[in-house]
Amino acid sequence: MRRPAFIGVFSVTLGLAGCAPPTEPHVCTAIAVEALVVTVVDSASGQRLCDATVIVIDGAFTQALRPFPAVTECTYSGPTERAGLYEVRVTRSGYVPATMTNVRVTADECHVIPVKLTVSLRPAS
């Protein structure tokens, strides 16, 4: 039995319609996204350090990152919804300070794209 040719044409047309750009505006979520999530560890043991100070700098902008979601997680996060090119400085008593430079945070049409970092601190001699 022969099938009508219009079924094949309909399939191709339907497939191409899926490639058209959306006509509706993009909907963003109503959440605040942290640009950086930093974990600080002891370089010798790999143990997380929960009482470090993490400062980020982007030009004239400076912010101390806060423990998030809680101090027990040993991660530091921020700034909220701010793309940029950051320098990350980490200090803790008894350790040699560490700095990471050129940490780039980008954003899409709604939010920043979070960057996760792990910074190892060397015990001071």
Image (cartoon, rainbow, N blue to C red):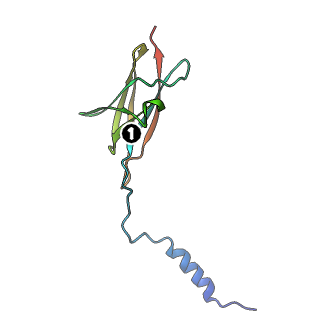
Which residue does the numbered mark 1 point to in the structure image? 104
The residue furthest left is 60
In the rendered image, the vertical position of residue 85 relative to residue 92, given as above or below: below
The residue furthest top is 125
Amino acid carrying label 1: it is: Arg
Task: Specify whether 14 is left or right of 35.
Answer: right
Is residue 74 something one can see in this rendering?
Answer: no
Which residue corresponds to the image point at 40% horizontal and 23% vertical from the top-left? 52
Which residue corresponds to the image point at 55% horizontal and 75% vertical from the top-left? 15
Is the N terminus in the top left, top right, bottom left or bottom right quadrant? Answer: bottom right
Which residue corresponds to the image point at 51% horizontal and 72% vertical from the top-left? 18
Q: How many marks?
A: 1
Which residue corresponds to the image point at 62% horizontal and 86% vertical from the top-left? 7
Q: Residue 22: horizontal and vertical position, in percent?
A: 42, 69
The residue furthest right is 1
Which class describes the residues within 10 Å of circle 1: few (<14), some (14-19), or many (20+)? some
Is residue 96 something one can see in this rendering?
Answer: yes
In which quarter of the view is residue 34 placed?
Answer: top left
In the rendered image, the vertical position of residue 40 relative to residue 83, given as above or below: above
Q: Residue 72: horizontal and vertical position, in percent?
A: 47, 30
Identify the element where label 1 is drawn.
Answer: strand
Q: Nearer the viewer, residue 71 or 16?
A: 71
In which quarter of the view is residue 81 placed?
Answer: top left
Task: Specify whether 99 is left or right of 8.
Answer: left
Q: Nearer the viewer, residue 15 or 53?
A: 53
Q: Residue 23: horizontal and vertical position, in percent?
A: 39, 72
In which quarter of the view is residue 13 placed?
Answer: bottom right
